[in-house]
Image (cartoon, rainbow, N blue to C red):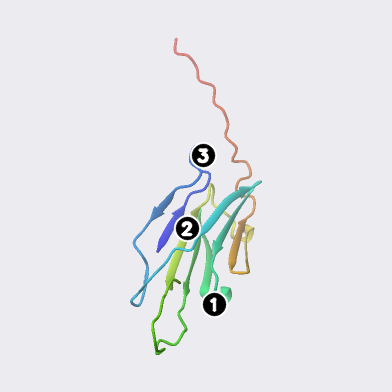
């Protein structure tokens, strides 16, 4: 599943999510991990719930102009030959989440850390100088 998050495009629109067609990995449908995107001062901080993933091998964080792209795959490594009934609530497969940035970001300003199943991506200074400027409206003569 691929989603795009647009945080703080203006005061009236805090978040917009666009859903694309699901991404498939073999015959398993993908999923969209929960995301929390916030402005913290001049920085954008995005947190993604990714429990059970190996961040070094299963997750990729990229900057593509004005887009922050987090993609990866949760692999099912359990034995399928178990006896008895099975209830499966955990989603497996590929995912892709895209966060639209207010301006193009320098890749050196992006950092990512994984702790306790949460991937935190910080884009430093992406909101610097993006405060709205009021334009005076002139009355026609």
The image shows residue 70, relative to residue 52, as above or below, that is: above
Which percent across, then down, holds residue 13? 48, 41
Sequence-first disc among 1 and 3: 3
Taking the image as shown, residue 68 lies to the left or right of residue 114, namely left
Q: Are marks 2 and 3 in contact (CB under 8 Å)?
A: no
Q: Can you say which quadrant of the picture contains the N terminus? A: bottom left
Residue sitting farthest toward the front: 84
Identify the residue position indicated by label 1 in the image. Answer: 57
Name the residue at 55% across, 70% down.
51
Q: Position of residue 32 (x, y in %)?
A: 44, 63
Residue at image location 54% in from the left, 51% down from the top: 104
Q: Is residue 130 above or below residue 93?
A: above
Q: Which disc is residue 4 wearing?
A: none
Checking the image for residue 10, the label placed there is 3
The percent position of residue 24, horizontal first and vertical second, equals 36, 71
For disc 2, the marked residue is 98
- Label 3: which secondary element: loop
């Amino acid at each position: 599943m691929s989603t795009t998050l647009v945080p703080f495009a203006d005061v009236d629109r805090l978040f917009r999510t666009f859903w694309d067609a699901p991404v498939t990995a073999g015959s398993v449908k993908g999923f969209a991990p929960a995301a929390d995107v916030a402005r913290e001062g001049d920085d954008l901080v995005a947190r993604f719930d990714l429990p059970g993933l190996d961040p070094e091998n299963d997750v990729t964080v990229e900057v593509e102009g004005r887009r922050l792209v987090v993609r990866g795959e949760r692999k099912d490594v359990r034995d399928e030959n178990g006896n008895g009934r099975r209830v499966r609530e955990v989603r497996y497969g590929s995912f892709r989440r895209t966060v639209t940035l207010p301006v193009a970001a320098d890749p050196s300003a992006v950092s990512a850390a994984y702790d306790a199943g949460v991937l935190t991506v910080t884009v430093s200074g992406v909101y610097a100088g993006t405060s709205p400027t009021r334009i005076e409206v002139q009355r026609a003569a």
